[in-house]
Image (cartoon, rainbow, N blue to C red):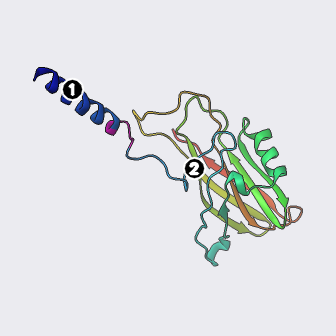
Amino acid sequence: MIKRHIAKLTMLSFVLILAGCGTGNAPDESTNNDSSTGTQSSQEAESGGENGTMVYEKVTAKQLPDTVKAKVNEIKEEGGGHSISENEQTYLILGLGQRNTGGYQIEVTKVERKEDTVHVYAQEVTPPEGAMVTQAITYPTTVISLDNVDEQEVEFTYHIEEAK
């Protein structure tokens, strides 16, 4: 009888441990950062004609041409903003540089054109205080695409707001 109770308690403990392992708020693919390329999955931004707001699309690593993937890997450590045109698309790569743990993201909030300058606004998203994060150096990066913009006619200005 005691062995039966011990077996039941052991099974119950095992089930509770397994149930507790789920985070309940794990990121889905639409916001998941891949630490090797750091890109985020496709999601179209709202568009509007006023103030020169431009339509852009977040791009996954799988969607990137090889030359863009290579550029992402080349610049991810330094962070900042970079542009590259290929296949009638202009890809804008934005990075935060090195972070000491996982859980950081960069989120593009707006892209707008003012005369001959395209302004890209983004902000750093930090992990919640006390959150369990990957204990590894990461390079949060995201890539968005615009319909082909002639890089010789416009200048790209990046406004990346880092968390304090």
143 and 10: which is toward the camera = 10
Q: Amino acid at mark 1?
A: Ala
Asked if the stretch drawn in magenta spans residue 143, the answer is no
12 vs 61, nearest the viewer: 12
What whole-number distance in Å separates the C-alpha atoms at marks 2 and 1?
Answer: 52 Å
Q: Magenta residues, as a range?
A: 19-23
Q: Nearer the viewer, residue 58 or 120?
A: 58
| Residue ID for mark 2 | 123
- Relative depth, front residue between 92 and 33: 33
Instruction: Look at 86% across and 66% down and name the residue there.
Output: 150
Residue at point 65% right, 41% down? 96
Dot 1 lies on which element? helix
* Residue 118 point in image, percent of width and height: 74, 63
- Amino acid at pointer 2: Gln
Q: Which residue is mark 1?
A: 7
- For this orientation, the residue located farthest to the bottom is 49
Q: Main secondary structure of the magenta part?
A: loop
- Viewed as shown, does residue 11 lie left or right of 134? left
**Direction front: furthest residue:** 1
Residue 19 appears at what percent x and percent y? 32, 39
SS for callout 2: strand
Query: Residue at the location (78% across, 48% down)?
Result: 69
Percent x, y of residue 72: 76, 45
| Residue 114 circle label | none
Mark 1 burial class by Cα count in 10 Å: few <14, some 14-19, many 20+: few
